[in-house]
Amino acid sequence: MTVAKERSGEDSTDDDGYVPSQRRIDREAYKRARSRRATALAAVSTLVTGAVLYLIVVNAPGWPRTKETFFNGEYAREALPKVLEGLWLNVRLLLICGAAVLVLGMLIAIARTLRGPVFFPLRVLAAAYTDFFRGLPLIINLMIVVLGVPALRLQGVTVDPVLLGGTALTLTYSAYVAEVFRAGIESVHPSQRAAARSLGLTNRQALRFVVLPQAVRRQVPPLLNDLVSLQKDTGLVSIGGAVDAVRAADIIVGRSLNYTPYIVAGLVFVALTIPMTRFTDWVTARMDRRRAQGGAL
């Protein structure tokens, strides 16, 4: 049976009529060897760099005290369950605020791109919104909303720091996302809209079925980057007293005067952010490849 397979392989090679030249075989072998050398060199340089940094840190005069204050295993084990419990609040804020940011940002972007003099006041309001909240530091926005709104004592208005902090995050990030959407809308060539109108579509239908699908696909990578930033900034709601991952770490730090819980909270956020970052890189590379091959965007 093996002989039959070998004969069938030889027959298929003969049928194809292609035999790689010795030059190509040598070139492929050279590429593989160069790739192996590059991988080995990268691994060695990484190990050397890590070893040098490790020696610099552990030989520093204040390393024993720093290790006890920031890398204490006992406090890390105490903080991890509470930080993970508080992280669930950050995840919920990311999901809810992320959806609200996308919807509000899209509406603001559409308002800024509406044509005709009748929509001029709407365009001005949308531009003022984006200019104001993009210029206002997020931490100040959070303080104004979380601390200022309850001070007004308005009937029917919540004083929950989680809801108020989520509102502040939505206000700020929707301004950034609106500009991302607007850039995508304006990147679509006017001939696309003109072609849609020539087929009998109204302005609204052309925007919905022709312009927006292309704009959103082109802006997926920057939108994902904004969501990554939003995920990190959900930790700022702790300034209003909400017990998220950062606040849970802060409670332990205030009691123990040891800063290891902050390191634990930081590593948890990093672990949550890395998959989103790698997914963003994958989407960006995939779109670049399709663009290079002349595929649809």
Image (cartoon, rainbow, N blue to C red):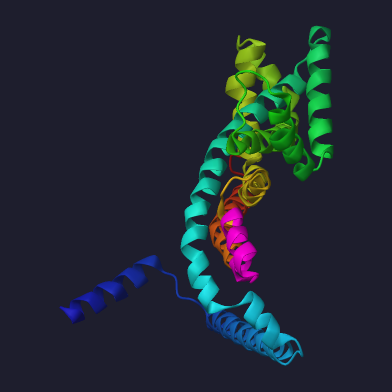
The answer to which quarter of the image holds residue 137 is top right
Image quarter in which the N terminus is found: bottom left
The extreme top residue here reads 118
Instruction: Locate residue 121, reporting x and y percent.
Output: 82, 13
> Compared to 131, does 88 lie above or below?
below
> Compared to 176, does 199 lie above or below?
above
Relative to 93, is 127 on the left or the right?
right
Residue 251 lies in magenta, yes or no? yes
Instruction: Locate residue 285, reporting x and y percent.
Output: 61, 55
Q: Residue at x 69, y 20 (%)?
A: 193
The extreme left residue here reads 1
Magenta span: chief secondary structure: helix
Q: Residue at x 75, y 40 (%)?
A: 143
The answer to which quarter of the image holds residue 294 is top right
Residue 164 lies in magenta, yes or no? no
Relative to 266, is 56 on the left or the right?
right
Q: Residue at x 71, y 25 (%)?
A: 108
Q: Which residues are magenta?
A: 246-263
**Would residue 116 be visible to someone looking at this image?**
yes
Query: Disc count in the image?
Result: 0
Image quarter in which the C terminus is found: top right
In front: 78, or 26?
A: 78
Instruction: Locate residue 79, reporting x and y percent.
Output: 52, 65
Q: Residue at x 59, y 87 (%)?
A: 40
> Compared to 106, does 263 lie above or below?
below
> Compared to 119, does 67 lie above or below?
below
**Would residue 177 be visible to someone looking at this image?**
no
In front: 238, or 258?
A: 258
